[in-house]
Amino acid sequence: MESAHQEFDEMSIRDEPDFPWNSLISGYAELGQYEDALALYLQMEEEGVEPDRFTFPRVLKTCAGIGLIHVGQAFHRDVVHKGFGNDGFVLNALIDMYAKCGDIVKARRLFRGMIQEVFEPDHPVAVSTILSSFLSLKIAAQIHGWVLRQGIESNISVVNALITVYSSVGKLDGASWLFHRMPERDVVSWNSIISGHSKHPEALLYFEQMMNSGTSPDSITFVAILSACSHLGLVNDGERLFRLMRKKHRIDPRMEHYACMVDLYGRAELIDEAFNLIAERMEFYAGPTAWRAFLYACSVHGNIEMGEIGGRKLFELVPDNRHNFELLMKIYSNAGRWEDVERVREMMLDRGL
């Protein structure tokens, strides 16, 4: 982020919100550097750059991240003033912000207004967008009832979103019931049900059914099924599917797929295989996701030597991520290496963590 911000500071023209302002704000928010994200938004205002429908969700996420409801309320007023009060994307972020900041009453009021004013029976895409943003069984059930009353329960995008929500709150029976009642399915349907069963053997059964149905898997399908293999400890199946992805389906592995494989090896205590995958077999430079999965595996299995390698790499890539330091401290602590624990703690203090 430091180098990205430096490039941003050197730009002569930056009067459009989409790039680079939104990108940089989003980057800080994703890293948990919420104060920096808010400061950047204020700088954006000072320079006279108008926010758009993608700016507000990013800054509202920062308010939710640090619980600044009064700042979120100020942004809410800006949202209305600038004409984004009925934008579903922005409303999702507002509801999420109020809920995470503890104002459930306000979140519910906004949500009900959304259902009554924004959604019409011929807007199933909007319904699926809202469904995907909620992980509450009660709210999901309410929307499901509304979907049935509006007669749009056969819309694929709506059912896919319902499957995702029911899976996310642990109601796999409800997700499966919906899936099996679908008159037709697309790749998102299969991805949703496989992802929902990522900790259960049924994930592999659904994947085989998908292959037999003639639906071609995509990149997301393989993230879901490789994640399932990782959780279930199915190393051989994971390796087979990883090869199948490229050889049969012509899908080049991305960082997410490699991270799943690192996690697969790590959970099986195959630390050397995980390191070899990152250091030698990856076709591009390993990012924080893969190295974090590696460090986590080292912390679980107490591998100090490899953990130090993973820790050093992460400190270079994301120097302000507190969790990475804590993982390395855990490795040292479990080994009784208290001087190293203190050394890492001092590194955190030096970085203001």
Image (cartoon, rainbow, N blue to C red):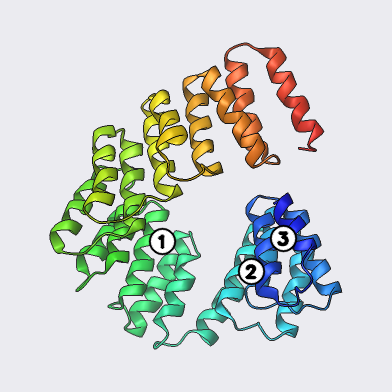
> Is residue 197 depicted above or below 322 in this figure?
below
User: Considering only order in the chain, which callout, 2 or 3, is on the residue closer to the N terminus?
Assistant: 2
Mark in front: 1 vs 2: 2
Q: Give the quadrant of residue 179.
A: bottom left
Q: Report the amino acid beneath label 1.
A: Val
Horizontal side, residue 245 vs residue 123: left or right: left
Mark in front: 3 vs 2: 2
Please tell me whether mark 1 sits on a helix, a strand or a loop: helix
Check if mark 3's residue and mark 1's residue have beta carbons within 8 Å. Answer: no
Report x, y in % for residue 194: 30, 53
Q: Report the amino acid beneath label 3.
A: Cys
Q: Badge 2: few (under 14), some or many (20 or more) residues near its Cα, within 10 Å?
A: many
> Which residue, given by chain and number where applicable, does mark 1 sit on?
165
Residue furthest to the top in view is 336
Please tell me whether mark 2 sits on a helix, a strand or a loop: helix
Q: CA distance from mark 3 to mark 2?
A: 10 Å
**Is residue 102 at least partly visible in the picture?**
no
> Which residue, given by chain and number where applicable, does mark 2 sit on?
57
Horizontal side, residue 175 vs residue 119: left or right: left
Which residue corresponds to the image point at 64% horizontal and 30% vertical from the top-left? Answer: 326
Horizontal side, residue 70 vs residue 222: left or right: right
Which residue corresponds to the image point at 48% horizontal and 84% vertical from the top-left? Answer: 119
Q: Report the amino acid beneath label 2.
A: Pro
> Is residue 121 depicted above or below 274 in this figure?
below
Q: CA distance from mark 3 to mark 1?
A: 24 Å
**Is residue 264 at least partly visible in the picture?**
yes
User: Considering only order in the chain, which callout, 1 or 3, is on the residue closer to the N terminus?
Assistant: 3
Q: Which mark is residue 63?
A: 3
Q: Quadrant of the C terminus?
A: top right
User: Considering only order in the chain, which callout, 2 or 1, is on the residue closer to the N terminus?
Assistant: 2
